[in-house]
Amino acid sequence: MAKVIVYPPTSMILSDLVERMGHKALVVPESVRKLATADEIESPPLNVTPEEPKKGLRYAAVDVPSGVRGRMALIGPLIEEAEAAIIVEDPGWLTGCAGCSRTNELVRLLIRTKGVPVLDLSYPTDDAEAKAFVQKIKAFLGELK
Amino acid sequence: MKVTKYVITSSESDILPSDIAMKIYGSKYDVNVKETCFGVVVSGEEEVINSLVKEIRALDPSGIFIKERGFPPGDPRRCRGRRGGGARPGFYMIESESKMLPMISRALASKGEAPPIPEKKKPLKPKRLEEIVKEDLS
């Protein structure tokens, strides 16, 4: 079972396909859960403590907007854990945790410079593309140990 | 550790969110369940939820999709009832991807090789355009 980071990191389709193939999908909701449901809420309501900006600073400089550093505090540790990656071209409708274009550029860059196997795709627009999309993901994940 | 997951149905699936909710109500599992327009949100202990979602997926393996969720169902930090209305940010992502689910479901259910996809027409490169203009002028 390999740990596979998916981009967009909140994608339902990608995380579901990775889990179906028996691998572990690294997704943002898991990072959010660790903060939001921790037994001891140190800093309500979202439990973002002074430690989180420090994590973000490992990936982005102090003069980078706080939104980028905040998102990187969640996504950065996932990239470090990743053993493979599936990147889907930005469809133009990303929101929430994946709604910052600068963060998304940095995430894609960090994944590519990490040197793990990467599968590049774009979201399907018809049945033929969807079939190829699913088969490429199956083949890529099948090669991972 | 408690986890929360979305169980999302494809719009072409024969399984309705209410069917999933009824299955969970009738199951032996001690979990919280919330029915929504696109599926259900289930929350409980990790091992319990993992075996439960496996059973739910078996209802329609290619038409049911599972997604992680950070906040528990009805959490006042995310619940729109407490925030004055409006969808939470993650809903738009689910909404956009849900439109693709019928295609993905059909792809998962189908067997055999994918048909070759014709290459999409690319816009004319400026250099080629210049050549065409020069050819016409000469």
Image (cartoon, rainbow, N blue to C red):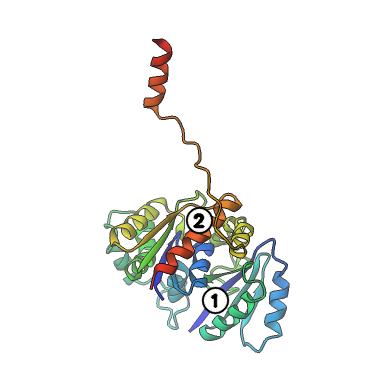
> In which quadrant will I find the C terminus of chain A?
bottom left
In which quarter of the view is residue B8 placed?
bottom right
Farthest top residue in view? B138
**x and y percentages locating residue A105 in the rendered image:** 37, 52
Residue B50 vertical position relative to residue A50 in the rendered view, above or below: below
**x and y percentages locating residue B116 in the rendered image:** 53, 49
Tag of residue B4: 1
- Residue at 71% x, 85% y: name it: B26
Which one is nearer the viewer's eye here, B42 or B14? B14
In which quarter of the view is residue B93 placed?
bottom right
Indicate the chain on which mark 1 is placed.
Answer: B
Residue A116 appears in the figure: yes
Q: Name the amino acid, label 1.
A: Thr
**Mark 1 surroundings: few (<14), some (14-19) or many (≥20) residues within 10 A:** many
Farthest front residue in view? B112
> In which quadrant will I find the N terminus of chain A?
bottom left
Residue highlighted by disc 2: A95
Indicate the chain on which mark 2 is placed.
Answer: A
Residue A49 vertical position relative to residue A6 in the rendered view, above or below: below
**x and y percentages locating residue B45 in the rendered image:** 53, 85
